[in-house]
Amino acid sequence: MMQFLDSADHYDQTAYMMLKWTTNDGGGSSTASGRNGRGIVPGQGLGLTLDYQTGWVLGFAFNLQGQTSVGSGIIYELSATNAVPLIRLVIENDFTLSVYSGIGQAGHPGNLIATSQGPAVKGLVWNYVEIKIALSGSTPITAVVSLQLNGQLIVNAVSGSCQQNASSTITGLAEANFHKFSAPGGGDGLIIDDIYIADMSGAGLVNTFVGDVSLFSFFPNADDITNWAAVGGSTSTLFDHVNDQFAETNDDTVYIKDGTVNDIYSCYYQPIPLFGGTVPAIQLVALNRKDSEGTRTWQFYGNGGVLGSAPFGPFAAIDSYQYNFCALDSNGGSSWTQGAVNGSNWGAKIIS
């Protein structure tokens, strides 16, 4: 089931990026130099907390900003709440990819589970890597790992120890919830873009490699249900109060608001241009907050009903801005088509 997508195109400031991501160990930033529009510099470690799962599959585009040997460099790691990495994806000093587990000593990435032994990653160009991780067992936790690079399977279901027991995790199970991306050496020598993260629970339609994906942000262009009220601006329509590409453009001056339970706002979006591929998933994203009085919960709404279940709704609004998101890889049990996306309406409903 798809859980997270990021094209990085809807924010141009690191502060707004961090209203969507969870942690920034240093140097993580938004950049205009993405693969398709904007991108992300992960720096020393840009982290995202999702829910606990026994299996994850994810992909991201990355661009190494040089071709000099940088030594072993971690670009992704999966861990549980105890912060001990279960799996690490590493670019070796010959630019091949390997998978390690555990903490390691003296800067070493840990215990080698699998190495691709080629092909080498190219520097100064965009590559697309995907990793699939299935966790099981308890003493120790075992991982079965596969890797794809630019659509080519380079590691196929190799099993290895994660170097820690399930009892050392907060749930006591072979599960993980924290995803961290980083640059080799922790500097600004890596840009990432077009990120997807899915669990392998079988609950949705995406439970294995998606392939090289291009992600784009689309914004409201027409109203549908208008129970909410427009604030600021020079028009009476609502969609143009919430369709800025960058949130700080109008911030607290032009927006929509509501405080009545069951009130709905929904709108139509810019159409997806025709292309030859498929639509594996969409993600609804809303920057939101409440005022200082009382509590308020809301949920994404679309095509006649509320969307998402915990932890992707209902959401508790807080006094400060935050991004909430809900990824959808199923359209009523079927895959999304371009026509279905273009004909859909999405928005928000006040729950309590």
Image (cartoon, helix red, strand yellow):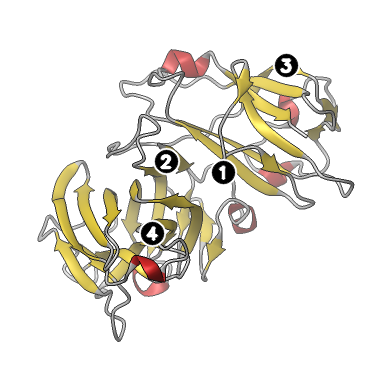
Q: Does dot 4 land on a helix, a strand or a loop?
A: loop
Nearer the observer, 71 or 302? 302
Q: On the rendered structure, is 86 left or right of 251?
A: left
Nearer the observer, 166 or 210? 166
Q: Nearer the viewer, mark 4 or mark 3?
A: 4
**How many residues crowd mark 4 within 10 Å: few (<14), some (14–19), many (20+)?**
many
Gap between marks 3 and 1, in whole Å? 25 Å
Q: Which residue is mark 1?
A: 311
Residues at circles 1 and 4 in contact by the CB criterion of under 8 Å: no
Q: Which residue is mark 4?
A: 173
Residue 152: x and y in percent read 16, 43
Q: Does dot 2 land on a helix, a strand or a loop?
A: loop
Q: Is residue 45 above or below residue 58?
A: below
Residue drawn 33% across the image and 65% down it: 86
Q: Which residue is mark 2?
A: 36
Residue type, numbered disc 4: Leu
Q: On the rendered structure, is 35 left or right of 67?
A: right
Q: Does dot 3 land on a helix, a strand or a loop?
A: strand
Q: Closer to the N terminus: mark 4 or mark 3? A: 4
Q: Nearer the viewer, mark 1 or mark 4?
A: 4
Q: Nearer the viewer, mark 2 or mark 1?
A: 1
Gap between marks 2 and 3, in whole Å? 32 Å
Residue type, numbered disc 1: Pro
Quarter of the picture holding the C terminus: top right
Q: Which residue lies most toward the bottom here?
A: 106
Any mark on residue 225, and which? 3
Residue 99: x and y in percent read 22, 63
Q: On the rendered structure, is 245 left or right of 228?
A: left
Residue type, numbered disc 3: Ile
Q: Closer to the N terminus: mark 3 or mark 1? A: 3
**How many residues crowd mark 2 within 10 Å: few (<14), some (14–19), many (20+)?**
some
